[in-house]
Amino acid sequence: MTLTPLLPLMYEPLVRTALLEDLGRAGDITADAIVPADRQASLVLRARQPGVVAGLDIARCAFQLVNPAIRLTTERPDGSIVVPGDVIAAIEGPARGLLTGERTALNFLCHLSGVATATASLVSATQGTKARIACTRKTTPGLRTLEKYAVRAGGGSNHRFGLDDAILIKDNHIALAGDVRTAIERAKAHAGHLVKIEVEVDTLSQLEQALAIGVDAVLLDNMTVEELRQAVAMTGGRAITEASGRITAETARAIAATGVDLISAGWLTHSSAALDIGLDHLGLNRQAA
């Protein structure tokens, strides 16, 4: 799958806000005090853990917003698998700007690479099955676009980006509507002709009701492996089947083997550990060229 890069307009405001948060009211008083204004530096972004890279364009943006003269040359593009010691990118330019942008750039790069790495772990666990790994709306506020991009970099697929993408009828919707049938009927009456409808079901009985009325997808929530197998057989291709709830790299294989179309996991975006990436100095020049 080709990874389409994000347009700068989609992340530049986020990076700008993060830099302003770090710069505060007086800027980088440490770098300004210690590093001569004309000093140039050469550095590399280096992996310290095995994982998958995501967020290099965002890191580049952070450095170049501080100083447009900074140049970042990619060695391992987003979606690449890296091992400790691998050089991900080379960076050159005014030393003050490099130091000032370092933390913001690494915050984005390490976090997004962590999301991509977590996603890749589930993709690897389900390799050879038809199940695709998907994220959810359980994202860091403000970072949804970036985190969902990182999921794609890790080989996963995106679920809804927001409440207006599709109709997803969950347990509380059903409780307030009174039952599955009423909830689906109301959704169908409201939906436009291009809007898909998915319903979350906890039991095979609820699934039977949903299939009888007709929906585009069913979210099989917290079902056992045997229940999932029965649910796939009951559905018989009449709707997309999505398994969700307590998915881990250890359980994903058995869940995928039931024949579900999708496996969604919120922890990919809300709880994945950052990938350890360092910014290592290769040397300093005395003056600007």
Image: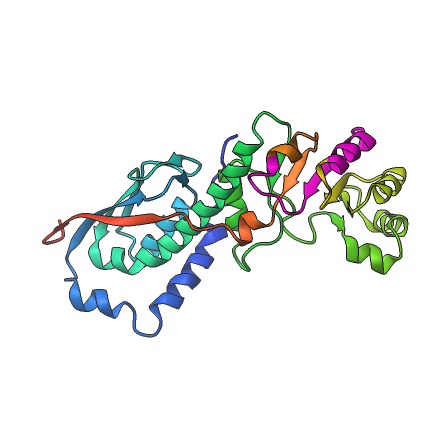
Which color scheme is applied?
rainbow
State which region is magenta.
Answer: 226-252
Residue nearest the viewer, comparing 168 with 254: 254
Q: Is residue 112 visible?
A: yes
Residue 246 in the image: x percent, y percent?
63, 47
* Magenta stretch contains residue 250: yes
Residue nearest the viewer, comparing 150 with 272: 272
Above or below 251: residue 273: below
- Residue found at the far top of this picture: 128
* Magenta stretch contains residue 82: no
Above or below 6: residue 24: below
Q: Residue 244, located in which quarter of the rendered image?
A: top right
Residue 15 in the image: x percent, y percent?
42, 57
Horizontal relation, residue 189 to residue 253: left or right: right
| Residue found 28% across the figure and 60% down from its top | 100
The number of discs equals 0
Residue 159 in the image: x percent, y percent?
64, 44
Residue 78 in the image: x percent, y percent?
42, 39
| Residue found 26% across the figure and 55% down from its top | 98
Horizontal relation, residue 65 to residue 282: left or right: right
Horizontal relation, residue 243 to residue 146: left or right: right
Q: Is residue 6 visible?
A: no
Horizontal relation, residue 232 to residue 214: left or right: left
- Residue found at the far bottom of this picture: 25
Above or below 174: residue 212: above
